[in-house]
Image (tube, rainbow, N blue to C red):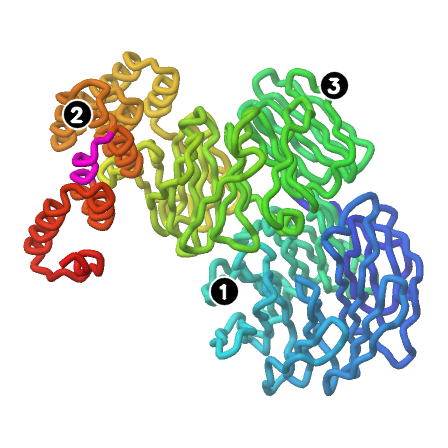
Amino acid sequence: MKFKTNFSKESVQKLGNVPYVHWSGAEEIYSCSTDRNLLKWTANTRESVQVASLPEDFHPTDLHLLVLKANVGGHGGKSADSLLIASNDGRFIIINKNARLERTISAHTGAITVARWSPDGSALLTAGEDGIVKIWSRTGMLRSTVIQNEGPIRCARWSPNSTAITYTQGSLMAIKPLVANSKMSKWKAHDGLVLCVAWANHSNLLVSGGEDCRYKVWDVQGSNLYTSFPDENPITSIDISPEGDLLAIGGFNMLKLCHYSGWSYSTCRFPQNVGSLYGLNWSPDGTQIVAGCGNGALLFGHIIDRQLMSRNLKATAVGRRTIILQDILTKTSDTLEFSDRVIRMALGYGHLLVTTPNQLHIFNENYINTPVIVDGRTDVHILSLGVKNFVAVDVSAIYIYTYTGRLHLTPKFPGSSTQMPNLTEKCISLGANVLAVRDFADQTVIYIFDLLPGATRQDEASVIRSKSPITEISVCRSGGMDNQYLVFIDTHRDLYIASLRSGAENFPIHKIGTQVLSVMWGSDANILVGLHDACYTIWYCPGEACTDPTLIGLTTLTYDSTEFGKSVTLESFEGCQIGLKSSGALFTISVKIYCNLLHKFVQDSLWSQAIKVCRLGQTPVLWATLAAMATKKNQLRISEEAYARALQIDKIHYLQHIENLPASCAEQMAEHSILNGRQTEAEICLLHNKKIDEAIALCIRMHNWSRALEIAEKHQTNLDFVLKERQKYLKALNKSEMDPKFLSIK
């Protein structure tokens, strides 16, 4: 992957000195420089028209546009709502989209070095050579003076949620929360001056560049995640793509494209003397960049050689409108030409999806020459593929399509229309029969939609609530409706799993991992892989084993990943092959093929073949996986043998106890629910069959004393038995009664 670059056609004399630039839409760019002309450029033709002339005593030092996300995209984009331009005499001006001057504010003593709109558009910040950072309202009213320091402030940026700012002063970098009485963090970032900084829109990553010729990646605690090798010249500009997956790094006669973790895809060094790059800026769709050059020209660039691979298919975008699709098995290739530039691609399940500014193209690997074209889908910023459907997300809604181009579902939830521009790939997950979406306003909420026709959760979504904000969600990609699972990672890096059984009113949540950075489900089986800081973990049976910590331990294997290097990322998990990427190198690791086969046999109810696989493999992981899946499918005989091979003697005794109960009686069904961790279901089963005494005994076994007392009082039976057992329990623990419900009875 690399940039293909071009320069503006106008001469250096016309543009003046270094231009300050910013995107207004998918194809429009505004620029201004010391010649005081405000120009509007077309990225495709690299031609400009003059929009306005700034006052004669106004010499620009920075420019930023407030562009509503609903207006981004289309065939050339929309005009920006407001342009914010700073000057070297301490003033800033606000110009509307009609080039009319709305405000002129004297803000600082000396030059303003930074002027930036907040991401939500409700405020703006200015920082200057006087060492002061100020927050202003959208209309130019001073709200607060955030920072007052000695020495000029070179850079400042908003946090993605507009609740904090980062700024640089000399070699120091700081993060200042805007909440009252909050603590500011400050650290030394570079050996020389920090010249540029960027804050990712959808992650807690910051990137800085300095006079020491290095760029560095940081988290919000100030921990250094990556430090580059020194370049030949200082790093003068940095920007992070809107999706947060790419970095653009600019220096003297140099442009670098990098992964968000820091390692470089490619470096472009210009033979002509264009000078240093300033104001490096990604387009809203994340496919193009623009920068002002030290010689006064504008640099335009777009990404080429972007590659996707899935099983036997490989897609490469070799130009703005050209994709080459290769079949590795048949050694054939097809060149796909489009009438407009390619914005997004997705490859998987035998299909290639391509979005252009106004269309969505669906290619089947067997019918490449006859694609299905969906018109009217603009501003698509998320494409996610599933076995039967795919999801496309634009700035207004979520759309679920079949691969024939038929619109299957448009799921909605409270506030969904306003949240779509902020939705990221980690906040939406498409499974075999389920769609999960994390709420952007309340990040502890996940909405669940069924994709099967006539399902109950299509019109009204079910809700899963977490105790902590959620950073990533993922739904399994195989299995039936009774075998669907969702995993999510919260801000504490804890990994949780929930069963999405059809018809369930609530979703029990179980914790199965800690310090997890990212996860991915297998394409053919419900096997899960997760990355940690220095290792990776494979859960061979997370859904069925999550209710039993012993089973989770038996069916989980952890391996060291330091041999792959630092900043390892998950790229794919297809079949038995897991793709990991580190520093640009792709590594392939394999899961146990016997476990993969075991999942397929159990899914098809081929129990004899499943047992043969376990007897052939003869590993504790295989037997424990079979035991967990057989227990859930009520195959007690197979479970007993599997537990015996896994040396789980206590579970064998429990299974024998269940088998000795009368067949299909309420007690047996309740015990089976207990074995699968569904305590509420077991209690309901007993109560519906008028087994009151057994339900009370079950609650006591589970130490659910409040519920046992509630049932005894409601049905006026066994109250003395509950109190007697409660006293035995407290006496064994050497504790006194503290529960108000039991104290009130005495």
Residues drawn in magenta: 690-698
Left-right relation of 31 to 136: right
Relative height, residue 698 to residue 270 (above, below)? above
Relative height, residue 346 to residue 102 (above, below)? above
Q: Main secondary structure of the magenta part?
A: helix
Where residue 144 sits: x, y (%)?
64, 81
Under circle 3, the secondary element is strand
Left-right relation of 81 to 454: right
Where residue 582 sits: x, y (%)?
48, 45
Under circle 1, the secondary element is loop
Instruction: Inspect this view and state whether residue 426 appears.
Output: no
Left-right relation of 42 to 728: right
- How packed mark 1 is, by other alpha carbons closer than 10 Å (few <14, some 14-19, many 20 or more), is some
Q: Which residue, as the protein is rendered here, is positioned at the far front?
A: 716
Q: Which residue is mark 2?
A: 658
- How packed mark 3 is, by other alpha carbons closer than 10 Å (few <14, some 14-19, many 20 or more), is few
Q: Which residue is mark 3?
A: 369
Residue at the image position 74 percent from the left and 71 percent from the top: 138
Q: Which residue is mark 1?
A: 220
Asked if disc 2 and disc 3 are in contact, CB closer than 8 Å, the reply is no
The foreground one among 731 and 492 is: 731
| Disc nearest the viewer among 2 and 1 | 2
Picture quarter with the C terminus: bottom left
Residue at the image position 54 percent from the left and 62 percent from the top: 216
Distance of label 2 from label 3 (alpha carbons) = 59 Å
Amino acid type for the residue under numbered disc 1? Val
Amino acid type for the residue under numbered disc 2? Ile
